[in-house]
Image (spheres, rainbow, N blue to C red):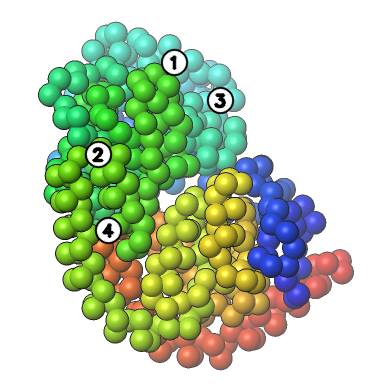
């Protein structure tokens, strides 16, 4: 870190492996003025609950909150499409003054009568928290009058960050868990938590488990169904991928129903294989283990020869990874190594000390590890580390393109499945296509000028 200026309050959130003993600040409020890439509480709850396809999702607040999060997960459904509708009470100035409870009640009566959903989630936004609408009372009244369980989601945006929205979503889901019949569930059964069926990924993972001889009781929340969530407490094991969003629910189920938890990642050959073997070992069934061995052997033997042609062009290229949770970043580093690439920057929005410690152990010397970074900071490290590729989400895409870097969308806006063994092949194609694109030869000519201008503006800002 020789050329990058860092805000004083941000310095503890950045670590360069090998420079000093590992110590990184995380799980804190964003530094004022740093323009964090994090989203708000409401957004966090919406992305978690949104893929429950047969539920009604109603945003109690201004129309902008609904527009901001419409179809935000891009989660696919194998049946109902109700989740893709975006309903809002569209609070106006008069509602702010006199309250929006009557408007919410009337909206729910009409929507439930028309759609007859399995359940309804009612999201509170910032303004609802400020004016003090009693959303819980409205939900209780609607549940009693319609027979459709109507669940408040306490997700006022100003209460924290996206991670607090995950907690609000888990509290809402916990009201459904344990209310269904568990008869007929196999002892060789699991719930998949924290996979959101982006581009059909949940279907790929579910198919693997079923080929192993394992019953998947519920997928929470990718391609989710209310009735499956009601009975998911009958499963033998909870397998959690997105730990930031789903660990709280899994912990609640462990405490109340005694269901053990294992963490998993479905990205890359190593982590995908490990996820399947971990489940087989826990279930301790000879047939399941034999099926798992056959599945992994067959899938890997098909995949590896197809990766060679991409690895040839990508060997030695440098990548930066910035994800929502840090656990996914670990899989990205391993996947990039499979392709012959080196990760020079790795970071996340919501990682904890344990996640970052593992990230540090896995990284090469000199890798920059970032917690809750901001666009200017990330852009300057990309330049300093001479990255060829940035892997991130929609908020990071403009940074890569403005700098003239290849970009791979690994967040919930993408339309290509990257999970599973076939997902690893898709990932290799994506990375190869963008890193080797001839357009960057033209962008590189402009890149130096852009950076000179940015650095000049930054220096002028410091002087003023």
Q: Which residue is mark 4?
A: 420
In the image, 249 versus 113, the foreground residue is 249
Q: Residue at x 46, y 31 (%)?
A: 248
**For discs 4 and 2, the disc positioned in front in the rendered view:** 2
Residue at numbered disc 1: 136
Q: Marks 4 and 2, how far apart in space?
A: 23 Å
- Report crowding for label 4: few under 14, some 14 to 19, many 20 or more residues within 10 A (C-alpha): many
**Whether residue 444 is visible:** yes
Answer above or below: position of 382 versus 298. below
Which comes sooner in the sequence, label 4 or label 2?
2
Q: Relative to 368, say whether 257 is above or below.
A: above
Rendered view: 186 above or below 3: above
Q: Which residue is mark 3?
A: 129
Q: Quadrant of the N terminus?
A: bottom right
Q: Is residue 192 above or below residue 424?
A: above
Residue in view at x 80 percent, y 73 percent: 459
Where is residue 251 drawn, in percent x and y? 44, 29
Residue closest to the eye, 85 or 203: 203
Q: Which residue is mark 2?
A: 284
| Mark 2 and mark 1: Cα distance apart in space | 44 Å
> Measuring 31% from the left and 56% from the top, which residue is drawn there?
272
Dot placed on the residue nearer the N-terminal end, 3 or 1: 3
């Amino acid at each position: 870190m020789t050329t990058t200026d860092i805000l004083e309050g941000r310095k503890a959130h950045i670590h360069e492996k090998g420079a000093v003993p590992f110590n990184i600040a995380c799980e804190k409020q964003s530094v004022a003025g740093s323009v964090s890439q994090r989203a708000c509480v409401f957004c966090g709850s919406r992305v978690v609950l949104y893929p429950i396809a047969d539920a009604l999702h109603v945003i109690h607040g201004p129309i902008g909150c609904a527009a901001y999060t419409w179809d935000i997960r891009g989660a696919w459904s194998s049946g109902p499409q109700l989740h893709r509708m975006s309903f809002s009470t569209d609070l106006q100035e008069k509602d702010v003054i006199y309250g929006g409870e009557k408007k919410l009640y009337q909206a729910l009566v009409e929507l439930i009568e028309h759609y007859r959903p399995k359940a309804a989630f009612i999201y509170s936004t910032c303004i609802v928290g400020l004016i003090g609408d009693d959303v819980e009372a409205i939900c209780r009244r609607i549940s009693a009058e319609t027979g459709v369980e109507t669940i408040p989601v306490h997700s006022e945006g100003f209460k924290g960050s996206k991670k607090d929205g995950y907690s609000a979503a888990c509290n809402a889901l916990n009201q459904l868990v344990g209310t269904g019949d568990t008869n007929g569930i196999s002892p060789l059964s699991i719930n998949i938590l924290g996979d959101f069926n982006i581009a059909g990924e949940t279907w790929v993972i579910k198919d693997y488990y079923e080929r192993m001889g394992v019953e998947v009781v519920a997928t929470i929340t990718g391609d989710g169904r209310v009735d499956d969530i009601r009975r998911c407490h009958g499963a033998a094991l909870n397998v959690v991928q997105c730990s930031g969003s789903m660990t709280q629910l899994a912990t609640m189920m462990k405490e109340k129903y005694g269901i053990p938890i294992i963490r998993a990642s479905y990205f890359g050959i190593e982590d995908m294989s490990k996820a399947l073997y971990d489940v087989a070992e826990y279930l301790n069934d000879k047939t399941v283990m034999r099926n798992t061995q056959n599945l992994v052997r067959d899938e890997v033997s098909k995949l590896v020869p197809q990766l060679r042609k991409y690895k040839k062009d990508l060997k030695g290229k440098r990548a930066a990874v910035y994800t929502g949770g840090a656990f996914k970043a670990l899989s990205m580093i391993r996947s990039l190594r499979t392709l012959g690439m080196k990760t020079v920057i790795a970071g996340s929005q919501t990682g904890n000390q344990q996640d970052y410690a593992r990230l540090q152990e896995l990284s090469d010397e000199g890798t920059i590890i970032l917690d809750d970074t901001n666009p200017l900071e990330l852009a300057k490290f990309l330049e300093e580390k001479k990255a060829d590729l940035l892997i991130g989400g929609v908020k990071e895409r403009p940074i890569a393109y403005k700098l003239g870097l290849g970009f791979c969308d690994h967040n919930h806006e993408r339309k290509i499945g990257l999970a599973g063994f076939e997902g690893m092949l898709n990932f290799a194609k994506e990375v190869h296509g963008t890193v080797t694109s001839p357009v960057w030869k033209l962008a590189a000519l402009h890149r130096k000028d852009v950076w000179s201008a940015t650095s000049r503006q930054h220096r002028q800002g410091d002087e003023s």
